[in-house]
Image (tube, rainbow, N blue to C red):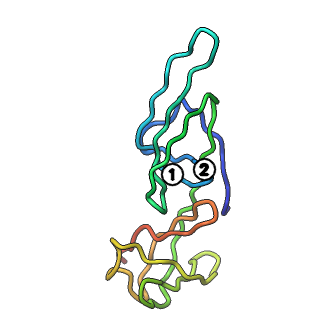
Amino acid sequence: MAGDKKFVNVSSLKKGSYIIVDEVASTVTDISISRPGKHGHAKANIMAEGLIDGKKRNMVTGDHQVEAPVIGKKNAQVLSVDGDMANVMDMETYESFDLPIPEDLKGQVQEGCTILYWEILDDKVIKQVKNE
């Protein structure tokens, strides 16, 4: 599952779509498609923001398809919290690993609680604290 990609048509992209820009999973923030010229194809100018690092990226393509990440959404139980890191256990595979706690979830991620995390390419990131 980790590292999975798929291809999507540029014409189907809209704000909020997920794509891969410079090998980084990103969210489309703006897209404009030029009309085809006399001797060429339509070009798409895609502005995107990294899902994990938040950096803005730009992609200009004449291709009809772009890569998009396959995002795995999974639940895990927090085993322990140490500073900005949480040691969690996947509730399906029982695999344990450390995840950084996002700034907006600090104080909510506590030992014993259940979290939703996303597997994006080769990264895992906490997205939500679930209320039991």
Q: Residue at x 51, y 72 (%)?
A: 75
Q: Taking 7 as reference, is 83 above or below it?
A: below
Q: Mark 2 belongs to which amino acid?
A: Asp
Q: Taking 117 as reference, is 25 above or below it?
A: above
Of 89 and 47, nearer the camera is 47
- List x then y, in percent, for residue 60: 55, 34
**Residue bearing mark 2:** 22
Q: Mark 1 belongs to which amino acid?
A: Ser
Q: Point out the frontmost of discs 1 and 2.
A: 2
- List x then y, in percent, for residue 129: 38, 74
Q: Taking 70 as reference, is 97 above or below it?
A: below
- List x then y, in percent, for residue 27: 47, 49
**Residue bearing mark 1:** 26
Query: Is 16 placed left or right of 41 in the picture?
Result: left
Q: Residue at x 43, y 83 (%)?
A: 84
Q: Residue at x 47, y 84 (%)?
A: 85
Q: Residue at x 66, y 63 (%)?
A: 2
- List x then y, in percent, for residue 43: 56, 25
| Numbered-mark total | 2
Circle 1 sits in a helix, a strand or a loop, which is it? Answer: strand
Of 93 and 67, nearer the camera is 67
